[in-house]
Image: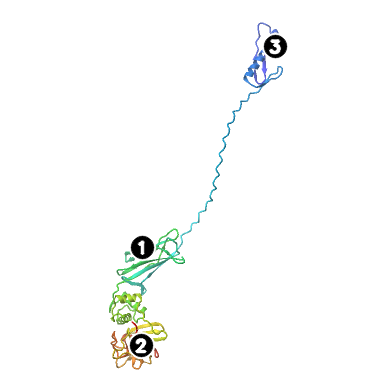
Amino acid sequence: MGLTFRGGARRLPMTAVGHASPESARSSTFPRMSRIARGALSLSMLALVAPATAVAGMSATTVTTPVTPTTPTTPTTPTTPTTPTTPTTPTTPAPPVVPAASGRMRLAVEGVFSVNSKSVTVTGRPMRVNGTVRPFIGQQVVVLHIWKGRDLVKSETVKVLRSRKGTFGFFSVRYVSGSAGHLNITAVHAATPEQVRVVANPQKIDVVLPIAGPGSTGTFVSLIQSRLAALHFAVPQNGVYDELTQNAVLAYRKVRGFDRIFTLDGPTIHGLLTGIGRFPVRYPNQGRHVEADLTDQVIALINGSKVFRIYPISSGKPSTPTVLGTYHVYMKTPGYLPDGMYYSNFFHTGYAIHGYDPSPTYPASHGCLRLPIDDAIDVYNWIPIGTTVDVYYGAN
């Protein structure tokens, strides 16, 4: 026999007290022992669990497991206000990659002359290499090389300058060759992020010694002949320092007021190469006419204000001077006359423009305007009947 407790209590066995019979023991002692046992058990349960809810009478007590007191919550530390985030600057997209510009570069050499389709100059004469680059891009440079044969005689890095409107760039390099030879001039614009590599057209220059005299030939003689022709002096273009070339040199020296000789010297060469020594036309309104300057001892065949040809002459000597004034050609006689006049153009009584040998460098005629024999036919063919002839002393 035992007692059963609600709430999961285990069953306890009961033993007999003394020697009483089970029946008497049940009847006499059970109530009291039951009360004692229940009390003890109740106290034991109260000691184990609290609080408990008592049930009236003899009913078993349902015991609730006590709740462990909650530990007071530690106050939460106030959150530090978050610093406002600085707005992020929008990322600027990378500019598109611009391809390097294509370009072109050209060279030209100033201070040289064209002789038989070649560019020519003389030793000691400055030349200037000018270049253009298109398009113009700032901070660009060009490397210029000048070769004489296989020798590099000049290398220079030059900055490309902006033109006035910015449509192209330009550069310039001065050079003087102290010796004869063949020059090859090159220029290169190295590749940059903004512009591709550009190579200029090379320039080839022949540099010659400025030496020539009667009978000599070569490039320098051709150069002198071309410069005389550019100033309208009558001269062949054959590269030979012949008699006609000597006459042209004499006429040039007369116009310049130099000594009346047939050879070249420094001032003559310099003047020819710089274009000094033009004949000054006195009567530009007379159309096709001839002017004879007795001071310079030359005649000029002129169309209006433009000189066609200039020739040396020998006018009348002091005892038989040439008449001064304006006249017109009234008669022409080809060939020789008995007194040695050759291809004559008469402009006043017996005064004529004609060839004669000799025709010295000074006034020596009987009043006519003597030409060298070699020039007489060309002058005769240019002058028609009626051509005006002006004879005067110039101011040279």
From the viewer's perspective, is the residue at label 3 or at label 2 nearer? 2
Between disc 1 and disc 2, whose residue precedes?
1
According to the image, label 3 marks what residue? 31
| Amino acid, disc 3 | Pro
The residue carrying pointer 3 sits among few (fewer than 14), some (14 to 19) or many (20 or more) residues within 10 Å by Cα, namely: few
How far apart marks 1 and 2 lie (CA) works out to: 56 Å
Asked if one can make out residue 332 in the rendered structure from this viewpoint, the answer is no
Does dot 1 land on a helix, a strand or a loop? Answer: strand
| Quadrant in the picture for residue 20 | top right
Q: CA distance from mark 3 to mark 1?
A: 136 Å
Residue 213: x and y in percent read 28, 78
**Which mark lies nearer to you, 3 or 1?**
1
For badge 2, the amino acid type reads Val
Q: Nearer the viewer, mark 1 or mark 2?
A: 2
Visible residue check, residue 391 = yes
Badge 1 is on which residue?
156
Q: Say if 217 sits above or below 140 in the image.
A: below
Q: Identify the residue at horizontal 37%, vertical 86% (top origin).
A: 291
